[in-house]
Amino acid sequence: MARQAVRTAAPLPPADPPADPTAGALRQVVDELFAGTYAIGELMLVVAGGAARRRS
Protein backbone atom coordinates (compact mmCIF):
# COMPACT_ATOMS: atom_id res chain seq x y z
CA MET A 1 0.00 0.00 0.00
CA ALA A 2 1.41 3.39 -0.97
CA ARG A 3 0.95 6.35 1.30
CA GLN A 4 0.76 9.89 0.08
CA ALA A 5 1.77 12.87 2.18
CA VAL A 6 -0.83 15.63 2.18
CA ARG A 7 -0.20 19.19 3.23
CA THR A 8 -3.17 21.21 4.39
CA ALA A 9 -3.25 24.96 4.71
CA ALA A 10 -5.47 26.84 7.09
CA PRO A 11 -8.00 29.22 5.54
CA LEU A 12 -6.76 32.77 5.19
CA PRO A 13 -7.97 35.32 7.74
CA PRO A 14 -10.42 37.92 6.44
CA ALA A 15 -8.73 40.98 4.94
CA ASP A 16 -9.67 44.60 5.45
CA PRO A 17 -12.39 45.60 2.96
CA PRO A 18 -11.08 47.64 0.01
CA ALA A 19 -12.34 51.20 -0.52
CA ASP A 20 -13.71 50.40 -4.00
CA PRO A 21 -17.15 48.69 -3.72
CA THR A 22 -16.54 46.67 -6.90
CA ALA A 23 -13.24 45.38 -5.58
CA GLY A 24 -14.95 44.58 -2.27
CA ALA A 25 -17.64 42.56 -4.03
CA LEU A 26 -15.03 40.74 -6.10
CA ARG A 27 -13.00 40.02 -2.97
CA GLN A 28 -16.08 38.49 -1.35
CA VAL A 29 -16.61 36.22 -4.38
CA VAL A 30 -12.97 35.13 -4.29
CA ASP A 31 -13.14 34.47 -0.54
CA GLU A 32 -16.29 32.35 -0.97
CA LEU A 33 -14.69 30.44 -3.84
CA PHE A 34 -11.59 29.78 -1.74
CA ALA A 35 -13.68 28.63 1.24
CA GLY A 36 -15.72 26.28 -0.95
CA THR A 37 -12.64 24.86 -2.63
CA TYR A 38 -10.98 24.33 0.75
CA ALA A 39 -14.07 22.54 2.09
CA ILE A 40 -14.22 20.29 -0.98
CA GLY A 41 -10.54 19.43 -0.53
CA GLU A 42 -11.13 18.54 3.13
CA LEU A 43 -14.06 16.34 2.14
CA MET A 44 -11.98 14.60 -0.53
CA LEU A 45 -9.31 13.81 2.08
CA VAL A 46 -11.94 12.31 4.39
CA VAL A 47 -13.44 10.21 1.60
CA ALA A 48 -10.02 9.08 0.38
CA GLY A 49 -9.03 8.10 3.92
CA GLY A 50 -12.19 6.03 4.32
CA ALA A 51 -11.63 4.31 0.99
CA ALA A 52 -8.03 3.48 1.94
CA ARG A 53 -9.15 1.96 5.26
CA ARG A 54 -11.75 -0.21 3.52
CA ARG A 55 -9.15 -1.61 1.08
CA SER A 56 -6.63 -2.56 3.75
Image (tube, grey):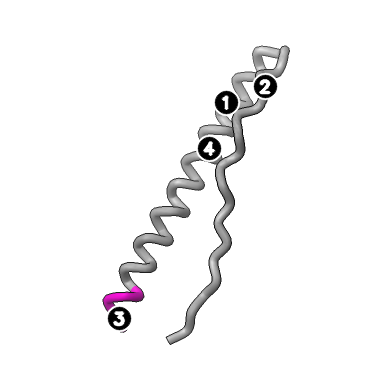
Under circle 3, the secondary element is helix
Q: Quadrant of the C terminus?
A: bottom left
Q: How far is the residue under mark 1 from the one under mark 4?
A: 9 Å
Is 29 drawn above or below residue 39 in the view shown? above
Which is more N-terminal, label 1 or label 3? 1
Amino acid type, residue under disc 3 in the picture: Arg
Numbered badge on residue 55: 3
| Residue beneath the point at 53% across and 37% down | 33
Which mark lies nearer to you, 2 or 4?
A: 2
Q: Which residues are magenta?
A: 52-56
- What residue lies at 35% left-to-right and 75% top-to-bottom? 52
Marks 3, 4: nearer the viewer = 3
Q: Is residue 53 magenta?
A: yes
Question: Residue 54: percent from the left, percent from the top?
Answer: 27, 76
Mark 1: secondary structure: helix
Measure the C-alpha gap from mark 2 to mark 1.
11 Å
Q: Which mark is residue 16?
A: 2
Q: Is residue 17 magenta?
A: no
Q: Is residue 55 left or right of residue 15?
A: left
Q: CA distance from mark 3 to mark 4?
A: 33 Å
Q: Is residue 12 above or below residue 42?
A: above
Compute the Cα span from label 3 to label 2.
46 Å
Mark 2 or mark 1: name the one nearer the start of the chain. 2
Work out how far the residue at label 3 is from the one at label 1, CA to CA, in angstroms. Answer: 41 Å
Q: Residue at x 62, y 25 (%)?
A: 26
Can you give x and y, in whole percent of width and height, for residue 7 in the image? 57, 62
Q: Is residue 54 left or right of residue 11?
A: left
Tell me the element at label 2: loop
Q: Is the C-beta separation of discs 3 and 2 under 8 Å?
A: no
Q: Residue furthest bottom?
A: 1
